[in-house]
Amino acid sequence: MPNSEQNYLPADHPEVAYGKIGVLLVNLGTPDECTPQSVRTYLGEFLADQRVIESPAWLWKPVLHGIILRTRPGKVAAAYKKIWRSGTNESPLRYYTRRQAELLSGSFDDRNHRPVINWAMRYGRPSIREGLDGLLKKGCERILIAPLYPQYSATTTATVNDCVFDVLKTLRWQPAVRTLPPYFDHPAHIEAIAESINDYLSTCERKPETIIVSYHGLPQSYLESGDPYYCHCSKTTRLLRERLDMDKDSLVMSFQSRFGPKQWLQPYTDKLIESLAKEGNKAVAAIMPGFSSDCLETLEEMGMQNRDLFLENGGESFEIIPCLNDSATGMRMLEILVRQELSGWI
């Protein structure tokens, strides 16, 4: 507290931090370790969220605890081991989210107007409560919540905001809060993704005949219930085609990571990759613009499983274009988004 303010306080008044502006970057989540036990804890929290699995609890919980959490953790832990960052002993998702927070903090030069940047995971650690507590202890009275999902879905952006508001309900002294809106069609996002594609095309050894734009899947019923995710993905893809001057055959949208017997958003990425290879397409590249950081779905599922699928069916070259991660291009986009939403606060 400034000395001028302290002069008005009683001698025994506790020191109070105040007057700061905070930003909380939030990503999906990650296990703490690539072990079955850690993965089981993470999946148990993630798949118990009724925003993610909309089946009635009485129907879903026996399946979750009786089957999925008994059979899946070992397989998922083995997949994590393939991409785990041994140097820092963390998943790529945790590493890049932390790096994004560090670099974003450094992009604000004026100390008097520099927001306090923190980061959190919706599922796992550091939790949203821990992230908010860290900002509040530093005196943040106004906080921007930034879910790192370009395309809105109730299963992602909404559940982050749900958790934030649940924490706020427990506070006696609440900060003012803003939430970052979806940025699927923001010019800075489209430009950043287009730039990453062009950078790849300018350096790759073999030009792809098709670029697959793959998004995380969602049950078809969620779309029919009003979730705008599919529409947001479609617009991102259309804007990328326009920006890159590509047609629908050169830049193809698809959806990955489905599970269970229900119908999910289509076309399915694995089916598309298999058909492209069988039709004689020899070189393919894939980009995942729904992910702000590389993770299990981009590195292991797409970069390993789907690469093998393409090669096994006659393809010759399958490459993935990295997510924006902590790249200069990605950080420039993130700074633009955050500065825009902090307008009037800084």
Image (spheres, helix red, strand yellow):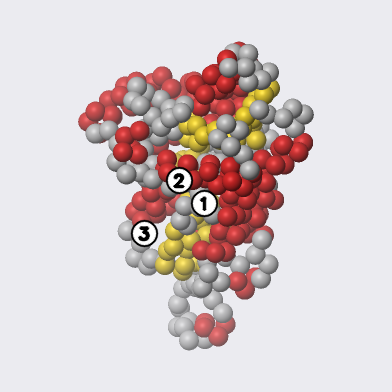
Q: Amino acid at mark 3?
A: Leu
Q: Residue at x 68, y 35 (%)?
A: 87
Residue 8, percent across and down? Answer: 48, 86
Residue contact between numbered discs 1 and 2, judged by CB atoms under 8 Å? yes
Q: Secondary structure at mark 3?
A: helix
Disc 3 versus disc 1: distance between alpha carbons? 30 Å
Of labels 3 and 1, earlier in sequence is 3
The residue located at (68%, 18%) in the rendering is 316
Q: Is residue 94 visible?
A: no
Mark 1 lies on a secondary structure that is: loop
Disc 1 to disc 2, C-alpha distance: 8 Å
Chain-order first, disc 1 or disc 2: 1
Residue position marked by numbered label 2 in the rendering: 232
Between marks 3 and 2, how big is the CA–CA gap?
29 Å
Which residue type carries mark 1?
Asp
The label on residue 168 is 3
What residue lies at 46% left-to-right and 69% top-to-bottom?
Answer: 141
Q: Identify whether 116 is placed above or below 18.
A: above
Q: Secondary structure at mark 2?
A: helix
Q: Quadrant of residue 199?
A: top right
Q: Is residue 208 above or below residue 191?
A: above
Q: Residue at x 49, y 21 (%)?
A: 271
Residue 95 locus on image (x, y percent): 61, 42
| Number of the label disc, if any, that sits on residue 296 | none
Residue 286 placement (x, y as % from top left) = 61, 32
Q: Mark 3, mark 2: which one is toward the viewer?
A: 2
Residue at mark 1: 185
Mark positioned earlier in the residue sequence (3 or 2): 3
**Relative to 243, is 253 above or below?**
above
